Image (cartoon, rainbow, N blue to C red):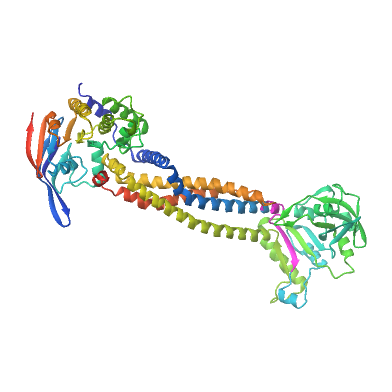
C-alpha cells in the first residue's frame, strides 16, 4: 500500500467559511436535539407540558376574542367610519333637575343650509310608541321616522318590497318598513307587502322588510320599524316636541374632524349657547361603540397574555430543570464531543437548540390544542362566532416559546460547554 | 513530527503540589509505532492527556506537527485535537444513539464539512477498518471488536498526525485484541504515526519503540 494516507490527506477539504459552518452546526444540533427528545419521549412531553398549557390557553383566548371582534367588526363594517350622528345630550345633573335637551327640526335645516361637505343628511325621529299589532299578534321594538337616505347611511337594504321614498315623506303616507324580527313576531309572511298593521289607533301599510342583521352581544338588530319622517312628526305632533337624531355622511373621510367642529359651531349658534357653556348635543361617530368594544377586548387579551406569560415562565423553568438533568446524564457524550474537537460554542449551541426545540414543539402542540379548545368552546356556546387565530398569535407564540427555550437553556448549555474534556470523559 | 521539551505537569490538590510529570523530553518522528508504558501512578495518563491536547502542560514546549500547543486556549486546543489527533479509548466512547457512520463522521462536523462529504469520508474510513458492511448499525448492535473498529475509523477520518490509543484492547478478549493490534500495525504500515498507551507488556512488545514512564520521568526508551 503506497502511502494511501498522504493521498487521502490531500483530499480532505480545509475549514469552510463561517456561515456554511454555522449552518452545518445548526443542522447537526437540530438532528441531535430531535434524537435526544425522541429517546426520552415521555420525559420530553412532561417537560413541554408547562409550555403546552400556557400556549394552549393564550391561543384559545385570543382565538375566541378575535372571533368575537371580527364578527362585530364585520357587522359594523357597513356603517362606515365617516358616518356621524348628531344627537341631543343632557348632562346628568341637568337630567336630575328634570331638564331634557332636544334637537329640533330647525337644527336639521341649519345643517342642510350651513355645513359643507356632508350628504345623506338623515333625520331619525323616535315614534313615542313601541307596539304594533297585526290581527291578534303584537310585536314590540324601536319605532323611528326617517327618510330614504337612511338606507345609504346605514347600508341597510330591503330584503323584500321597497324602502321609504321621498314621495312617502312628502305626502306623509302611512306606510312602514319592518325589521325582520318584527315581521316574524307579527307572524307576517316572508313578503308582507300590502298587509296593514296597526300602531295605536292608526293603520299603516307594510311596504317592505329589511335584511336581517342578526345579533350583536345578545341584542337583536332587527327589532325596529321605520315610517316616513314627516309621517312620524305628524303622528307625534299631539305629544311632546320630538327629539330627533341627525345622521349624515362626511364626503371626505379625512375631513371628519373639521366637519365635526363645523357642525358643533352651527348648532351652538342655532341653540344660542354662550361661549363658556357646554354643548347640549353630541356628535358621535357610528363606530364609537366598536372602538369601546375593541378597547375592552384588547384589555382582556393583555390580561390573559400576562397570566399566560407567567405560566410560560414556569414552563421555562421546567425545561431548564430537565435540561440540567440531561446535561449531567450526557456528561460522557459531551466529553467525547470535546475530545473529538467540538469547540465550546458548538456544545453551547447544541444544548441551547435542544432547549429551544423542546419549547417550540411544546408551543406548536399548545397551539393545536388551544385552537381545538377555542373551536370546542365556541361550538358549545350558542350564537358564539367562530374563533379566528390571527397570524401574529401564531408567530408570537412560536417566537415566545423559542425565546423561553433560549433563556432557560442558557444555564444548562453553558454548564455543558464549560465542562473540561478530561473530567467529562472520566465521569461515571 | 512530535516534540516535547522540558514538559512538566503539576496538579494542585488542596494547596499541595503533586508533580505528575517532570522534565519530559521526547521526540516522536512521523510514522513511528510507539508504546507508552508505565505502572499506574507513573504519569502515563497525564502524558497521554498532554500528547492528545486534552490538557496543557504546566511548563515546557509541545510541538505537534509544527504547531506550538502550549499556551493555546480551550477552543484552539479543541481545534488542534480535531485536526491532528485521533483518539481510541479503552471504553470505545461511541455515541450510543448514533449509527456507526454518524459516529465516524462526528469529528468532521466540527471542521465544518457538509453532510454529504462527511458521509463519504466516514464510509472510506469504515472501509479502511473493515466495517464497510456495518455502517447503519448502532453501537449496541455490534460486538466489542466492531465497536473498537468504529472508534478507530472515527480516529482516522480526519487524517490525524497522531493516532493516540489509550488501552485500546483493555475491554476486548485476546483474539479480538489481537485483531485490533493487527489493525494498528496495518495503519502504521500505511504511514500513520501510532502511539499506544498501555500497561500490558505483550502489547508494548508489538510496537517498534517503547517509552516507559516511572514517577513522572522517562525511565526507559528502547527501539526495535
Residue B45, position in %: x, y? Answer: 17, 42
Residue A279, position in %: x, y? Answer: 71, 72
Note whether residue A342 is visible.
Answer: no
Height in image: A416 above or below A227?
Answer: above
Looking at the rendering, the stretch of residues picked out in magenta corresponds to A73-88
Q: Is residue A84 magenta?
A: yes
Looking at the rendered image, the quarter that the C terminus of chain B falls into is: top left
The tally of labels here is: 0
Height in image: B142 above or below A354?
Answer: above
Residue at 17% x, 57% y is B14
Give whichever of A327, A271 is nearer the camera: A327
Note whether residue A192 is visible.
Answer: yes
Q: Quadrant of residue A142?
A: bottom right
- Along the horizontal axis of the image, is A155 left or right of A421? right
- Along the horizontal axis of the image, is A42 left or right of B138? right
Looking at the rendered image, the quarter that the N terminus of chain B falls into is: top left
Residue A89, position in %: x, y? Answer: 73, 70
- Along the horizontal axis of the image, is B53 left or right of A74? left
Q: Does the magenta stretch include residue B161?
A: no
Amino acid at each position: 500500500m503506497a502511502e494511501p494516507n498522504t493521498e487521502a490527506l490531500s483530499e480532505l477539504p480545509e475549514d469552510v467559511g463561517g456561515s456554511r459552518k454555522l449552518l452545518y452546526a445548526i443542522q447537526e444540533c437540530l438532528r441531535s436535539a430531535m434524537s435526544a427528545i425522541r429517546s426520552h419521549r415521555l420525559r420530553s412531553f412532561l417537560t413541554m407540558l408547562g409550555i403546552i398549557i400556557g400556549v394552549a390557553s393564550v391561543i384559545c383566548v385570543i382565538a375566541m376574542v378575535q372571533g368575537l371582534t371580527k364578527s362585530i367588526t364585520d357587522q359594523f363594517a357597513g356603517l362606515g367610519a365617516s358616518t356621524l350622528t348628531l344627537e341631543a345630550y343632557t348632562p346628568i345633573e341637568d337630567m336630575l333637575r328634570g331638564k331634557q335637551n332636544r334637537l329640533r327640526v330647525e337644527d336639521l335645516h341649519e345643517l342642510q343650509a350651513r355645513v359643507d361637505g356632508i350628504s345623506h343628511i338623515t333625520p331619525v325621529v323616535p315614534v313615542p310608541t313601541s307596539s304594533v299589532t297585526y290581527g291578534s299578534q303584537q310585536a314590540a321594538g324601536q319605532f323611528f321616522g326617517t327618510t330614504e337616505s337612511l338606507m345609504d347611511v346605514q347600508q341597510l337594504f330591503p330584503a323584500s318590497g321597497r324602502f321609504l321614498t321621498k314621495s312617502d315623506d312628502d305626502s306623509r303616507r302611512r306606510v312602514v318598513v319592518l325589521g325582520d324580527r318584527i315581521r316574524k313576531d307579527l307572524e307576517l309572511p316572508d313578503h308582507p307587502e300590502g298587509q296593514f298593521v296597526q300602531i295605536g289607533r292608526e293603520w299603516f301599510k307594510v311596504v317592505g322588510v329589511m335584511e336581517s342583521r342578526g345579533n350583536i352581544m345578545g341584542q337583536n338588530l332587527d327589532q325596529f320599524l321605520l315610517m316616513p319622517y314627516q309621517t312620524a312628526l305628524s303622528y307625534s305632533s299631539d305629544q311632546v316636541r320630538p327629539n330627533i337624531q341627525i345622521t349624515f355622511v362626511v364626503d371626505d373621510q379625512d375631513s371628519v374632524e373639521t366637519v365635526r367642529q363645523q357642525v358643533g359651531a352651527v348648532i351652538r349658534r342655532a341653540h344660542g349657547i354662550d361661549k363658556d357653556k357646554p354643548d347640549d348635543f353630541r356628535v358621535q361617530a357610528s363606530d364609537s361603540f366598536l372602538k369601546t368594544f375593541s378597547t375592552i377586548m384588547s384589555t382582556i387579551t393583555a390580561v390573559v397574555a400576562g397570566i399566560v406569560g407567567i405560566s410560560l415562565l414556569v414552563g421555562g423553568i421546567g425545561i431548564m430543570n430537565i435540561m440540567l438533568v440531561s446535561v449531567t446524564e450526557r456528561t460522557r457524550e459531551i466529553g467525547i464531543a470535546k475530545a473529538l474537537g467540538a469547540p465550546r460554542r458548538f456544545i453551547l449551541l447544541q444544548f441551547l437548540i435542544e432547549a429551544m426545540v423542546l419549547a417550540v414543539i411544546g408551543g406548536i402542540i399548545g397551539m393545536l390544542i388551544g385552537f381545538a379548545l377555542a373551536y370546542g368552546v365556541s361550538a358549545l356556546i350558542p350564537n358564539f362566532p367562530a374563533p379566528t387565530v390571527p397570524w401574529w398569535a401564531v408567530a408570537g407564540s412560536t417566537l415566545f416559546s423559542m425565546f423561553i427555550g433560549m433563556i432557560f437553556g442558557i444555564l444548562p448549555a453553558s454548564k455543558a460547554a464549560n465542562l473540561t474534556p478530561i473530567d467529562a470523559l472520566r465521569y461515571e | 513530527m512530535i516534540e516535547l521539551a522540558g514538559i512538566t505537569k503539576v496538579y494542585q490538590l488542596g494547596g499541595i503540589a503533586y508533580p505528575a510529570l517532570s522534565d519530559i523530553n521526547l521526540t516522536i518522528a512521523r510514522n513511528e509505532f510507539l508504546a507508552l508504558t508505565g505502572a499506574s501512578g507513573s504519569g502515563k495518563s497525564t502524558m497521554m492527556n498532554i500528547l492528545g491536547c486534552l490538557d496543557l502542560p504546566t511548563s515546557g514546549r509541545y510541538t505537534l506537527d509544527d504547531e506550538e500547543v502550549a499556551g493555546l486556549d480551550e477552543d484552539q486546543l479543541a481545534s488542534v485535537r480535531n485536526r491532528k489527533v485521533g483518539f481510541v479509548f479503552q471504553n470505545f466512547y461511541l455515541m450510543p444513539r448514533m449509527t456507526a457512520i454518524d459516529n465516524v463522521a462526528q469529528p468532521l462536523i466540527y471542521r465544518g464539512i457538509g453532510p454529504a462529504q462527511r458521509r463519504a469520508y466516514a464510509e472510506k474510513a469504515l472501509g479502511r477498518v473493515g466495517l464497510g458492511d456495518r455502517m447503519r448499525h448502532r453501537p449496541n448492535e455490534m460486538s466489542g471488536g466492531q465497536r473498537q473498529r468504529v472508534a478507530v475509523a472515527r480516529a482516522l477520518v480526519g487524517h490525524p498526525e497522531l493516532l493516540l490509543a489509550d488501552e485500546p484492547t483493555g475491554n476486548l478478549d485476546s483474539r479480538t485484541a489481537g485483531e485490533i493490534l493487527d489493525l494498528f500495525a496495518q495503519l502504521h504500515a500505511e504511514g500513520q504515526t501510532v502511539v499506544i498507551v498501555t500497561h500490558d507488556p505483550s502489547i508494548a512488545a508489538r510496537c517498534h519503540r517503547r517509552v516507559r514512564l516511572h514517577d513522572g520521568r522517562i525511565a526507559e526508551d528502547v527501539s526495535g
